[in-house]
Image (cartoon, rainbow, N blue to C red):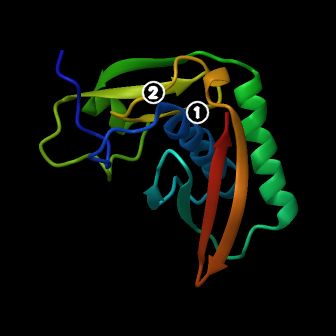
């Protein structure tokens, strides 16, 4: 089966960081209704995600997000995948980032009950492989909330 090209990154990813990104993205979308990050820079040493928000997140909200991701890490849930057709995916996901010419079969990555999204990237097998998730800084400017994070292994 052909692996779909859904991922916006062209380089090899660091699976623990990429999986942590999914956890944070899913929770941001649920809590704040902002959708997943519109801009992402995922690296081994540190990563950043940008979201459209009408007001800045408080320190308490940031610590709560950090705690949420670490709880998912500590739960040691399995990361699984499923393959579905694009027409099935349209009923469940935002398809706007699907590259033109992607195959009809797309991959959905599930991180236990914490997150599910379309993705062609590399992930850990269990969340315990991620390590400690730490938000190192954040900035809000002109309706954009940036969250910078690291993993301590």
**87 up-or-down from 141: above or below:** above
Residue 70, position as x, y percentages in the image: 76, 35
Looking at the image, residue 75 sits to the left or right of residue 129; the answer is: right
- How many other residues sit within 10 Å of disc 2, few (<14), some (14-19) or many (≥20)? many
The foreground one among 92 and 14 is 14
At x 40%, y 30%, the residue is 122
At x 72%, y 73%, the residue is 56
**115 up-or-down from 97: above or below:** above
Residue 100, position as x, y percentages in the image: 16, 48
Residue 7, position as x, y percentages in the image: 32, 42
Looking at the image, residue 1 sits to the left or right of residue 121; the answer is: left
Label 1 or label 2, whichever comes before in sequence order: 2
Looking at the rendered image, the quarter that the N terminus falls into is top left
- The residue tagged 1 is 115
- How many other residues sit within 10 Å of disc 1, few (<14), some (14-19) or many (≥20)? some
At x 82%, y 67%, the residue is 58
Q: Are marks 1 and 2 in contact (CB under 8 Å)?
A: yes
- The residue tagged 2 is 109
Mark number for residue 13? none
């Amino acid at each position: 089966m052909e692996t779909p090209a859904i991922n916006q990154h062209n380089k090899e990813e660091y699976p623990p960081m990429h999986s942590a990104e999914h956890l944070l993205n899913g929770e941001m979308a649920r809590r704040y209704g902002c959708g997943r990050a519109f801009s992402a820079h995922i690296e081994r040493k540190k990563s950043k995600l940008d979201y459209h928000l009408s007001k800045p997140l408080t320190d308490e909200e940031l610590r709560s997000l950090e705690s949420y991701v670490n709880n998912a890490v500590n739960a040691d849930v399995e990361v699984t995948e499923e393959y579905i057709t694009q027409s099935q995916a349209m009923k469940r996901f935002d398809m706007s980032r699907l590259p033109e010419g992607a195959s009809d079969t797309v991959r959905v990555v599930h991180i236990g009950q914490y997150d599910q999204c379309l993705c062609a990237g590399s992930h850990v097998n269990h969340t315990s492989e991620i390590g400690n998730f730490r938000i190192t800084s954040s900035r809000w400017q002109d309706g954009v909330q940036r969250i910078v994070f690291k993993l301590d292994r």
